[in-house]
Amino acid sequence: MFSRLGKKKKTIIVTISMLFTLQASFSSSALAGDTLPYTGGSATGLNQPTQHGYTSNDILEWKPETDKDAEMLRARVPLQERNEAFAATQANPGLSPDTQMFNIAGDYGNAFMDSTAYTNKFGQYTFPYWQYVDYYSYWHGMATVDVPKDLYNPSLPWYERWFEFGALNIPNPAYTNAAHKNGVKSLAVIFFSSNDRGPQTYTQMLVKDKEGHFPVAEKLIEMAKYYGFDGYFFNQEESSGVAVKDIPTYKEFLKVLRNSGLYVQWYDSVHNTTGKTRYENEFTAVNSPFVKDVQYGDLAQSIFLNYLWNKQKMENSKAHAESLGLDPLETVFAGVEAGGDRFNKQRNDLRNNLDSTGKPMNSIAMLGADFTHHALDEDLGGEDTIRRNSSDYQWMSFIRDRAWWTGPNLDPTSTGRNANAPLSDVAAKGDNWDGVAAYIAERSVIQGSNFVSNFNMGRGLGYYVNGKVSNSEEWSNINIQDIPVTWQWWMETSGTPLKADFDFGPNYNAGPRYDYQKVGAYNGGNSLVVNGTLDAENFLHLYKTDLQVKEGSKLSITYNKTSQDDASVMSIGLLFKDDPEKVVKVEVPNSGKKTDGWVTANLDLSKYSGKEIAAFGIVFDNGQQEKIDHYQVNIGQVKISDDSIEKPQAPTGLQINKALRDSNEMYISWNLSDYDDVKQYNVYNNGAYVGGIYDDVFYIKNLNGLSGEISLTAVSQDGQESAPAVVHYDLTKGVHNIKAAQSDNGDMVVSWENPKDVDGKITINISTEYDYAKEVNKTITVDSGKTEAKLSNMPINGDKYHLKIKMGSHDWISYRGTFIDKSIEAYPAEKVTINGTSVTWELPEARDWHYLYVYENGVAKTFNTTYSQGRKPYIVRGRTHLQELTFQTQSTDSILEFVIEDYSGNKASTVVRITLDGLYGVINGLVEKGELTQTAGEQLTETLTTAKEHYHGGRLKQAAIHLEKFKYSIDRNQFKDVPADTKNMLKASADYFLRTWAE
């Protein structure tokens, strides 16, 4: 290759055969857990809010008003209180309710750049087993905010992700809302790894300010509060470990987070004395100081133990926790590699966590239990297919999920291994796994005197309102998932068990295991269907509760019996706290008759006033018939109410914030009421349901018409829906086909098409959004009929903007874009530390930097990349190996230049080491190459010599003037044929002397 100074250098050529050898050991397709970008109608909307990852610098600079889409991605549901344990109604009354579960998994999937809170895709994962979990954290890599989407090619192998993932990923807000609704804490993940996070390292996080505070920790506290989550899981796995001198600082950092009220869990990966990355696989004096330290006191609340533990290690862990005055069931979590081992032979055995009496000694943590959905393709064969997101394969995901959580017998009362469990049809088996329900007692938040459920799983192939399809579009939105049924499935009978399933409607593929008439939902995406041969009483246990029965209490059940008239009797089965062994039946009148659609039966509970319902379900009895074949009833809603809750008032403050006509999207907002009064807001567009959330903002992906109305209702805790607030809109009277073209000088020409038969002055407003370097808020007006306008002197720095246009007094039409990017700031020289031939560099802070080239005497240095993908002649954001933060130069006096390049291709040079003789040599070399004329070279040399003489004479001001003259000369016409990189290097050299001489 050729050096930047014109000298030819030798290099090593990697042959094709060598390259093939390197690649052959890797998979040629995406990992099973990756969620590939959806296509077609389910593709991410052009302006749909999406999450992103954060580097330590991103955290340090974080403000909600500058974080892209922040206001649209908050969790607002408060953490709900769980009921006190009541063993008598547990599926396994002998299980200790004190054993906790920490579940770290994906959310809807593992989308790197398209993680949304809700979207129009049925085949996403909506976790339905909150009753077995105490903490949910998110193993979910996300690209940092400004990574261009075209850097991700999902068809390439996983090691070809040449972009940056954030060391911090925060929870999906919809998942946090669902977690909180079920009493589960939601935790972000902070992950440092030599491969997975490139040159990001923990030291960038642990920086203290002048007062000795941790600015990043303070920002993490702010972020948790703003986004509504509960704490952080720390996975510190850099191969180089933690420097011994940094261990006390790391502990101080953890303590700041814990003292703020956040929950912190630490992974078993760091040796307390040496700082080396080491996995103890038990709780010992080596890792316990990150939980409780002699000097620093209480740090993390708990630890996630690595997976290679055994019974002795579990006994030792319990003993060590108790020796520190800690409760092992609150502090020590035995790790299970769910995503790695799956239904195959486990690298550990949860039975080894049981003491001699069968009680768990420590709590349990799982990584990757969402494999039941996300690894479906890999387990079935063929990683690069998308069956896991296909509607036709979701029935498999449901059964695999059930087998993992309730056990291979798909019955929480019959947990334990079963090699004969018929699970091969869903690529699972039962000989290695007992089920989570074998070790964790189910929990419940259902309390008070009011409760309602539509059995909504948080996704559907359509949305139903009162038994009718309101919107035929598929969807997923775990925000509106009902509290899941406590047991899947606990069917108690002496005869043939009926089958239970979730019925998503006529277009749902329920798989070969089920044979029922598809009905769909009453409200939401699905109903609960019970069908089969009814030849004895069946009691389907549904919900564990602590409900108070009042004098005015009623229970209503909405159902649809599709099978023929028969002698069957359906009853509500109540288990009262004072006699939990007895099932008290409240019969549903005429329940044996086939219904004409959905019907609601209202049952009086006043005779049980003063009692507490500890659990309830539904009893199905064959009555006077010996056997009823093809029995089927769908349950659409159950509701217990004492009429103490008033119907909510219509929401206030409803308004349209952005109407994006060309992409058919809309942003709306309103005033938020307290969660005690409103559990959810429902959004309708021209009568069709488009979504629900507990928040004061909502994004509509597909408008149901360019004109009409947006309606918003408030839903109470017992399911009553308010009168609607309504805002009308008519986008047909606004402009369309908006385009914005910008020239290099910043001038922007905005063009559009006008609607027919609409007159009036046209107003254009443009304003910057989120993280901007130069604020803009400009409004101009043009005459009626005009189809373009010029906005002068707009930024050329890549800032995001929001453009609005309206005709007369009609609705604003929005358009969002990004200014062209023709500017870049040079990499700061102070980020480079030179010690002889050793050079240490820090990550650039520029939001859009992409590459950092390092030249020694004009020759590009090479840097090793992650995932063993060889060396590159530059530092690449997110993929240069962490070990390359320090590199070696050939000599101590060589010319050292850093060139930063952003995503738009702009470059800027910073010279961090050069001598005057070295700069003279560069100029002479350029003249020899013919890049500079003899005259231009002499002129630069003369100017530089004059600057040197002033400097040596102590005339710093005059020296600086001549260095500036040196820089100015380079932009004159006689240098017009000199390559831009060369000119940048010469100017940067002058800047080097300006800096160093001033010092």
Image (tube, rainbow, N blue to C red):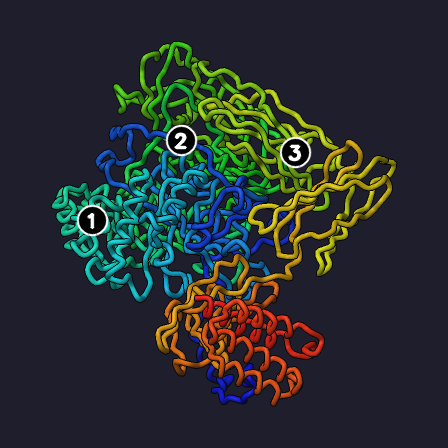
Write down the residue under mark 1.
353
Residue at the image point whose x is 56% and y is 67% from the top = 901
Q: Which mark is residue 434?
A: none
Residue 803: in sight, yes or no?
yes
Q: Nearer the viewer, residue 812 or 483?
A: 812
Looking at the rendered image, the quarter that the N terminus falls into is bottom right
Counting residues from the N terminus, which is met first, the one under dot 2 or under dot 1? 1
Mark 3 = which residue? 656
Which amino acid, by three-letter code, is at mark 2?
Asp
The amino acid beneath tag 1 is Asn
Residue located beneath label 2 in the image: 535
Give the residue type at disc 3.
Ile
Residue found 57% across the figure and 83% down from its top: 923
Q: Measuring from the top left, give residue 369's x and y in whole percent.
A: 37, 50
Return the residue nearer the eye: 293 or 206.
206
Q: Is 928 drawn above or below residue 230 in the view shown?
A: below
Please state the total of marks drawn on the protein image: 3
Label 2 Cα neighbours within 10 Å, binned few <14 / some 14-19 / many ≥20? many
Residue located 81% across and 48% down the image: 788
Image quarter where the C terminus lies is bottom left
Return the x and y of residue 394 as percentages of the image width and height.
Answer: 50, 48
- Of 312 and 186, nearer the camera is 186
Q: Residue at x 66, y 57 (%)?
A: 820
Q: CA distance from mark 2 to mark 1?
A: 41 Å
Helix, strand or loop at mark 1: helix
Mark 1: few/some/many CA within 10 Å (<14, 14-19, 20+):
many
Specify the quadrant of the image occupied by residue 95: top left
Residue 812 location in percent, x, y? Answer: 72, 37
Circle nearer the N terminus (3, 1): 1
Residue 824 at x, y = what percent?
58, 62
